[in-house]
Image: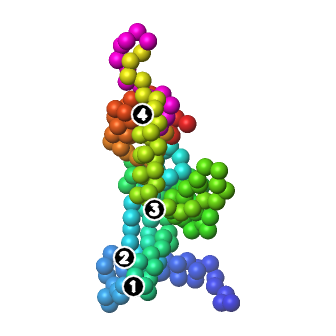
Amino acid sequence: MVQLSRRQFLKVTGSTLAGSSLALLGFAPIAALAEVRQYKLTRTTETRNTCPYCSVGCGILMYGLGDGAKNASASIIHIEGDPDHPVNRGTLCPKGASLIDFIHSPSRLLAPEYRAPGDDKWQKISWNDALDKIAGLMKKDRDENFIEKNAQGATVNRWLTTGMLAASAGSNEVGYLTHKTIRSLGMLTFDNQARV
């Protein structure tokens, strides 16, 4: 190791500081070459979404690679908080920070499943079949249990045997439309995940 006296150390430090300050001010003797680096997220597609865990509704940015073609299957490789979102401003709780594990979990359901009454096996069905089945069961229950008039003969239009729990990750507009739709069917039991 080189032995420097205190005076030599101060000279070297001072000249280094002066030289770097002049370079920062634009007095560099030659043009500076910028180093180009390939970051991990440069080739990805950014998608904005909402965290599905709790009722806060934090904004997230999901980064995916691949376009779903044969040679590049689409996959989410990184998730972070959305700095432009008014709720969380880029921060995520521990559950939100672990969303990548939720997405890539081997036990995650990717399609609706149905178990017939009395059966012990679940079978995968399409989204259209699931929505048709839900709509059919709702119609059947409403037709059987709808109360048009109460005991005094006043029109009440109530449906008391089915309830609705709305998702809190939706926007205010989605919540408003859900509330209006459910109330127009006569359903009284209505709540939001944000209160549960």
Q: Name the amino acid type tagged 2.
A: Leu
Q: Name the amino acid type tagged 3.
A: Ser
CB contact under 8 Å: marks 2 and 3: no
Give x and y (percent) for residue 97: 56, 59
Disc 2 secondary structure class: helix
Snapshot quadrant of residue 100: bottom right
In what quadrant of the picture does the C terminus appear? top right
The residue indicated by pointer 4 is 143
* Mark 1 or 3: the one toward you: 3
Identify the mark at residue 20; answer none if there is no mark: none
The residue indicated by pointer 1 is 36
The residue indicated by pointer 3 is 126
The residue indicated by pointer 2 is 24
* Most foreground residue, 37 or 60: 60
Label 2: how many Cα within 10 Å (few below 14, some 14–19, many 20+) = few
Give x and y (percent) for residue 56: 49, 44
